[in-house]
Image: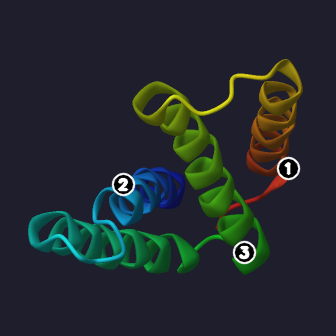
Amino acid sequence: MAWFYLFIAGLFEITWAIGLKVSEGFSRLWPSVGTIIAMILSFNFLAKALVTLPLGTAYAVWTGIGAIGTVILGIVLFGESRELSRLFFILLILIGIIGLKVTTPTS
């Protein structure tokens, strides 16, 4: 269940990262409210995952999920660079997440 919580925390991290852009520096009310709610939920699910998972692993996977998702949505929603080298390094983050999942024992 801890990995599921961590995955959900990562999805909410993507949500709040995109929300930071959409809220325009917290100057737009409803995007700001949504961003803050997503932050709270992200940290809540991360905390639940940390009950079982090692801190370093959980934090690295959480930020990795957030980074990958944010880059993909940045490309799709905001027309950010699709440079092959950029996508290659995102792939390396994904490989790192998979490696941590495979090599981390859970209690």
Specify which label sits upstream in the sequence, 3 or 1: 3
Tell me the colour scheme of the image. Answer: rainbow
Q: Is residue 32 left or right of residue 53?
A: left
Q: Name the amino acid, label 1.
A: Thr
Residue assigned mark 2: 15
Q: Name the amino acid, label 2.
A: Thr
Residue at point 54%, 41% (across, down): 69
The residues bearing labels 2 and 3 have C-alpha atoms spaced at a distance of: 24 Å
**Residue 103 placement (x, y as % from top left):** 85, 50
Quick one: SS at disc 3?
A: loop
Residue assigned mark 1: 103
Between residue 68 and residue 104, name the one nearer to us. Answer: 68
Disc 2, disc 3: CB below 8 Å?
no
- Which quadrant of the figure contains the C terminus? bottom right
Q: Quadrant of residue 83?
A: top right
Q: Which mark is residue 29?
A: none
**Residue 101 placement (x, y as % from top left):** 74, 47
Residue assigned mark 3: 54
Disc 2, disc 1: CB below 8 Å?
no
The residues bearing labels 2 and 1 have C-alpha atoms spaced at a distance of: 28 Å
Q: Name the amino acid, label 3.
A: Pro
